[in-house]
Image (tube, rainbow, N blue to C red):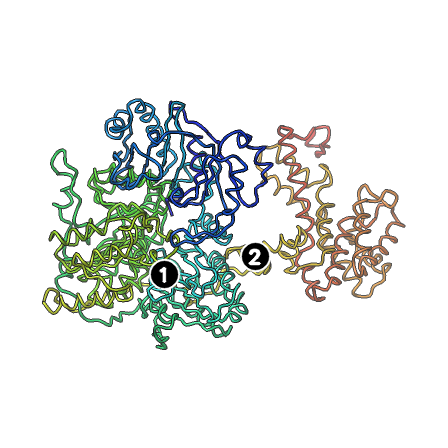
Amino acid sequence: MSAKAISEQTGKEFLYKHICTTAAVQNRFHYANVTAETDWNRLVQDHPWLLTERLVVKPDQLIKRRGKLGLVGVNLDLQGVKEWLKPRLMKETTIGKAKGLLKNFLIEPFVPHKQEEEFYVCIYAAREGDYVLFHHEGGVDVGDVDAKAQKLLVGVDEKLNEDAVKQQLLKHAPANRKEILANFLVGLFNLYEDLYFTYLEINPLVVTKDGVYVLDMAAKIDATADYICKAKWGDVEFPPPFGREAYPEEAYIADLDAKSGASLKLTLLNPRGRIWTMVAGGGASVVYSDTICDLGGVNELANYGEYSGAPSEQQTYDYAKTILSLMTREKHPEGKVLIIGGSIANFTNVAATFKGIVRAIRDYQDALKEHEVTIFVRRGGPNYQEGLRVMGEVGKTTGIPIHVFGTETHMTAIVGMALGHRPIANQPRGAAHTANFLLNTSSSNVTPTSSRTQSFCEVKSETSAAAAQKSKPGTPPVKATTLFSKHTKSIVWGMQTRAVQGMLDFDYVCSRTEPSVACMVYPFTGDHKQKFYWGHKEILLPVYKNMADAMKKHPEVDVLISFASLRSAYDSTMETMQYPQIRTIAIIAEGIPEALTRKIIKKADEKGITIIGPATVGGIKPGCFKIGNTGGMLDNILASKLYRPGSVAYVSRSGGMSNELNNIISRTTDGVYEGVAIGGDRYPGSVFMDHVLRYQDTPGVKMIVVLGEIGGNEEYKICQGIKEGRITKPVVCWCIGTCATMFSSEVQFGHAGACANQASETAVAKNKALKEAGAFVPKSFDELGEVIKSVYDDLVSRGVIVPAKEVPPPTVPMDYSWARELGLIRKPASFMTSICDERGQELIYAGMPITEVFKEEMGLGGTLGLLWFQRRLPRYACQFIEMCLMVTADHGPAVSGAHNTIVCARAGKDLISSLTSGLLTIGDRFGGALDAAAKQFSKAFDSGMLPMEFVNKMKKDGKLIMGIGHRVKSINNPDMRVQILKDFVKQHFPATQLLDYALEVEKITTSKKPNLILNVDGFIGVAFVDLLRTCGGFTRDEADEFVEIGALNGIFVLGRSMGFIGHYLDQKRLKQGLYRHPWDDISYVLPEHMSM
């Protein structure tokens, strides 16, 4: 969503902080906020002017016409304010259709003034620029300002100056106030632009001899500009419209949305309602809400929301569990229904998102059954069959009634079933599979000859392409009628390999002779080649670091498909438009600030370039060209017959709904000739009429379908075109968003532009006007397919469309990765792992999510237990492991490992090399005695050998007892590390049989020589065997296996790595030079004849 209303307090704060004007703006920051929790004593301390000035108090909750409604208390003292608030604060009030609590009030100084000192000013955004309205009479009785006010359009990229303000806006303003008003209005407009306002109204604006007073203010800002304006805005709170509470669950989903590349939206309308929705897609979510309201469910509709843009399984799970939690809090006497709907996805993996929903259903299965919830599912798109299967399966296993439907069912048919208006279909779904495109199984054998010939044979019209460059001087270039042909070549901006492969597969199935993608541009890597498939063959496409190289080396390219992020899309698009070869640009990114989009549109109009988007999936011309992910995967391309042209051209706002139109049109007509999704933003780069006129002028198009939307006035241009005879082909049109007029408070739908700012922008008004103009308008979206079929059948009966025989497309092999995703193939894995899984939303250690590891405070010892031993070890075991790591961390610079690390560090090597050189010294002689000691002592103990027998046998065999002996420490100078560990083990271990055995051996060895003690390596080795054998987590065989495979030496390696790294950092910090061993510490022993 882009334009969002802000509170009056926030708007004034922005104005007072950032306006630049010589006009004296009075009462800066003189406002106080009052809620039910307000501490009046503290408020007075913070705002001492409350005690000395006369005051005004009013609710600050996005309520219009507060003065007319008696919701402004004027010229009161502080006690008067309190008295005025008593009957209003936290009291339920009805304003229009909306009913809500008055709970947030604003107190400001009262400004004594005359009526003639009140003025009205408003600035609002439009496609062509920003309109400034000024009226010399302001206040509550200002009336119809659109008719009364002076109006000035400031075009995109233009500036407002004082002369223009005086001449065009201040005609009727008092002469002695013109100078100050002109200066203030210019400053206000600059503030409006700099802080990305989309609407700013001040009524009244009071100008007295003392200066300017901003009394009442209403404003909206472009929320998508947060990344630009964050420093000036700070953290902005967007209050809900009056009559709708701000719920923490809405804030939670908004936070998920902000952190995700996907789109997640939730608005609670009636938490006690029985009809809940979980719909995929901005356009589809509106259509489902429309249908629910059309069927009488408006008072029971609990929520509006949507998820789209390929959310992950975890994100969908978080979204779904939020909705399930909300709908299972209060019971409804008739039970509840959950509609999990959506159009046919273009690129979202339906199975992955449904698995997230299924997880949530399993978590809430008891509550869902208790609240008698019935679930209806309808979806299509990549891997949707698997998604529907898991959804049906969870219904069977949990006992929750879940009715599942695919693309064979009309998108909104499940709403009628859920509300009892039509029987629940029981038809078995075909054994369709995403892999079906491997087979040529066309059910239809006709397609229009004229369309096929026109589209398949048309070469790009030189005249249309050149028209933009050869137009008359002084007139804007003419945009091409034909955007795409079978010879169109494009550049893809961004490393979108999946989208590019989809385009190449589409090209191949359309029997194009060459790929439609000439190259890719990706600024974050150097120039290189990227591998793709062309049918069965592998090909290489060049990837360039900068746009200039791509344009220079590929002069045949005239289309750019931009997958640039919302932050870089503006710059990359403006750069692209410098190259005259580009005629069409598709901008996929959602969330580009409207002010930047308007600059793109202006530049494109000047250059004669057609812009599709922003916030779009793109468009498709069957048999010729498709933009990115449009049309979905190949199974949908074939099912909707998008590999060859039909006779019907469409234009919609929604990308997901464009794919639904592909499905509807293919089932009711001979198919799609061309389809474009112009995007859901308020100011799409090209509008409905641009494409409708193209279709009107294209011989192959016999009828036109338009899927309009609430918000904006573009659909009225179609009405005008039909009335004036400019559009003569049949137009089937339906505007979604009819439900908006039934809601008591304003709802911002999934698309940024889907919001009516006046009555003419409502979907109901547009549908009425279209019907009156002569377009074919169904009664609801449910009937859209029937109306399209009726118009098409009439054209066939009149011979306007002559069907032709179907030609089967070539077979395209399936990618290995996708075939594996669908479970169609298998191959032996190159690696096996059983300790860690990083593939999901959350890292998992031996089956334990990383969040649980931290929640349980398992520490380093517990983590090591999971990763090394695949067990959750007892607390004492985790502590022992950590103690072992601590005592083995370092033993000074003199030992071989530390010495090697130091020498290597002083030789200028990096940390990894220095650490490795130290680790390579670890073995039986240094540090590696843990395993050997554990094995020797275990073998002796397990064989029943007495300690003395063990010592004598090792001496007889001429072997050292590993873990016995120390160069410095002795029985008289004990190693405190061993003592610390011994005390802990004796206190916490259930049994210490092997340690006791080793201590008996130590008694024998130290009686012979005092330094033959059980050293730290030996102690850890035998104690660890006791731990593995007695902690209850391992069988005897498992414990022995860990000793055998070297797990215990890992303790020393891990611990001593800390010390080696310390020595490396120490040497670097001390800036020690290259080490050379001194001669006097080397004994040179050479043969006598050599020394002579």
Q: Amino acid at mark 1?
A: Ser
Q: Foreground residue, 216 or 738?
A: 216
Left of 906 or right of it: where is 379? Answer: left
Judged by depth in the image, the label closer to the viewer, 2 or 1, is 1
- At mark 2, the secondary structure is strand
The label number, if any, that marks residue 1012 in the structure image: none
From the image, tell me which residue sits under label 1: 289
Occupied quadrant, residue 765: bottom left
Is 817 situated above or below 445? above
| Spatial CA span between label 2 and label 1 | 39 Å
Label whose residue precedes the other's in the sequence (2 or 1) = 1
Q: Foreground residue, 402 or 925?
A: 402
Does residue 1091 appear in the picture of this structure?
yes
Q: Which percent across, then down, holds residue 556?
A: 21, 44
Left of 766 or right of it: where is 189? Answer: right
Does residue 565 appear in the picture of this structure?
no
Occupied quadrant, residue 165: top left
Occupied quadrant, residue 458: bottom left
Q: Which percent across, then down, holds residue 694?
A: 17, 51
Q: Amino acid at mark 2?
A: Ile
- At mark 1, the secondary structure is helix
Is 1057 situated above or below 448? above
Q: Foreground residue, 758 or 622?
A: 758
Badge 1: residue crowd in 10 Å (few <14, some 14–19, many ≥20): many
Disc 2 + disc 1, Cβ < 8 Å = no
Seen at 19% across and 54% down, the residue is: 486
The label number, if any, that marks residue 844 in the structure image: 2
Q: Which percent across, then down, holds residue 1082?
A: 71, 32
